[in-house]
Image: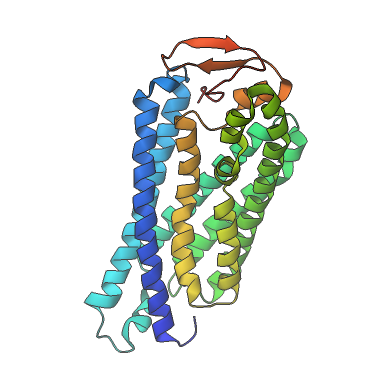
């Protein structure tokens, strides 16, 4: 990070501030997801096993991101308040203690959240490309490689004198970020391609208004986790150049790691997200099974005005 004290401290402070904002958004989305998965009558037909899975998955993401957030706040409090008067100031404390156990624990929690988030994206990609299993081989291999490098980077950063942003750890951190970001670029492109392909088909099956809900801009952004992918590219560029601003992006990217999959789960919970059953029915032109506002199942034809094609969570 160089010898620029103020840029480093400013970047860490800004990163923690944005992390707090995004954590609040994460908590809000989590509570909404839990509500809809539990009591929303629009999803009564959802399989209980799927509901339990998404509830457990969301809860685990929240726990992991809470650990990461708490570790950041703990480290900031120690750097700026408890040990502010040490020789060399906060920046010296940062360099000497970044491998502290609680900070490494926070890093491990964030890396685990990233593994879970990428795993969900791999599954979501399978929903859209399950008919061509060969297309899933390459992203699966990249995912496994990124998991291995993420674990290695976390262990390396926790060793004595380890530093996620400097030294030997960077030699592991860069390949991990590259693999993670390449994976997200690939699955994002694959999901967007399928959404664009199905858009015209949905317009004829469900009508323009309904198709926009499931293939419009918001659907593309959430289903493909496009903001997370773009943010990761920016973070990688700053990390490779060893700029102080990488600290801010590390915190923001670390928060979005959990926010992106939570957004997908929320869309599923409210009946607006894609499921394999719904996608298969639309792509093959079969009848759609939907749930009306009273919770009773009804079968509608291709040209019906379905309101919940993804009612199977």
Residue 215 position, x and y percent, is 62, 36
Left/right of residue 32 with respect to residue 232 in the rendered view: left
Colour logic = rainbow
Q: Quadrant of residue 98?
A: bottom left
Q: Looking at this view, is 208 or 260 the one in front?
A: 208
Q: Position of residue 201 (x, y in %)?
A: 72, 28
Above or below, 296 relative to 112: above
Residue at 33% x, 81% y: name it: 90
* Residue 220 percent coordinates (x, y): 60, 43
Picture coordinates of residue 56, whole percent (x, y): 40, 34
Tell me if 99 is positioned left or right of 218 in this view: left
Q: Going 69% across and 31% down the picture, which residue do you hit?
A: 130
Q: Is residue 275 left or right of residue 63?
A: right
In the image, 67 versus 150, the foreground residue is: 67
Q: Is residue 207 above or below residue 245?
A: above
Q: Is residue 91 above or below residue 61?
A: below
Q: Is residue 2 visible?
A: yes
Residue at far left of view: 82
Number of numbered callouts drawn: 0
Q: Residue at x 71, y 42 (%)?
A: 193
Question: What residue is rendered at 44% in x and 26% in y?
Answer: 51
Q: Is residue 141 visible?
A: no
Q: Is residue 266 above or below residue 148?
A: above
Q: Nearer the viewer, residue 305 or 44?
A: 305
The image quarter containing residue 71 is bottom left
């Amino acid at each position: 990070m160089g010898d620029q004290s103020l840029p480093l401290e400013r970047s860490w402070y800004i990163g923690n501030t944005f992390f707090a904002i995004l954590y609040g958004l994460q908590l809000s989305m989590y509570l909404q997801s839990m509500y809809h998965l539990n009591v929303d009558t629009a999803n009564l037909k959802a399989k209980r096993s799927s509901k339990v899975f998404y509830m457990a998955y969301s809860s685990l993401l929240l726990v992991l991101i809470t650990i990461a957030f708490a570790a950041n706040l703990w480290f900031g409090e120690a750097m700026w308040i408890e040990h502010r008067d040490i020789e060399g100031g906060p920046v010296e404390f940062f360099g000497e203690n970044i491998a502290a156990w609680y900070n490494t624990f926070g890093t491990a929690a964030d890396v685990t959240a990233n593994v879970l988030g990428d795993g969900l994206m791999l599954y979501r990609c399978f929903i859209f490309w399950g008919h061509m299993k060969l297309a899933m081989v390459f992203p699966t291999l990249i995912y496994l490689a990124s998991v291995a490098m993420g674990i290695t980077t976390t262990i390396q950063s926790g060793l004595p004198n380890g530093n996620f942003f400097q030294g030997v750890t960077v030699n592991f951190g860069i390949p991990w970020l590259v693999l993670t970001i390449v994976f997200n670029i690939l699955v994002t492109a694959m999901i967007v391609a399928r959404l664009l392909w199905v858009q015209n088909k949905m317009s004829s099956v469900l009508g323009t208004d309904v198709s926009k809900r499931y293939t419009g801009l918001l659907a593309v952004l959430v289903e493909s986790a496009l903001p997370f992918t773009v943010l990761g590219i920016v973070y990688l560029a700053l990390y490779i150049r060893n700029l102080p601003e990488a600290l801010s992006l590390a915190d923001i990217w670390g928060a979005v790691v959990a926010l992106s999959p939570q957004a997908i789960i929320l869309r599923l919970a409210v009946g607006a997200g894609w499921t394999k059953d719904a996608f298969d029915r639309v792509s093959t032109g079969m009848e759609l099974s939907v749930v009306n506002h009273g919770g009773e199942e009804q079968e509608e034809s291709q040209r019906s005005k379905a309101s919940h094609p993804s009612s199977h969570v």
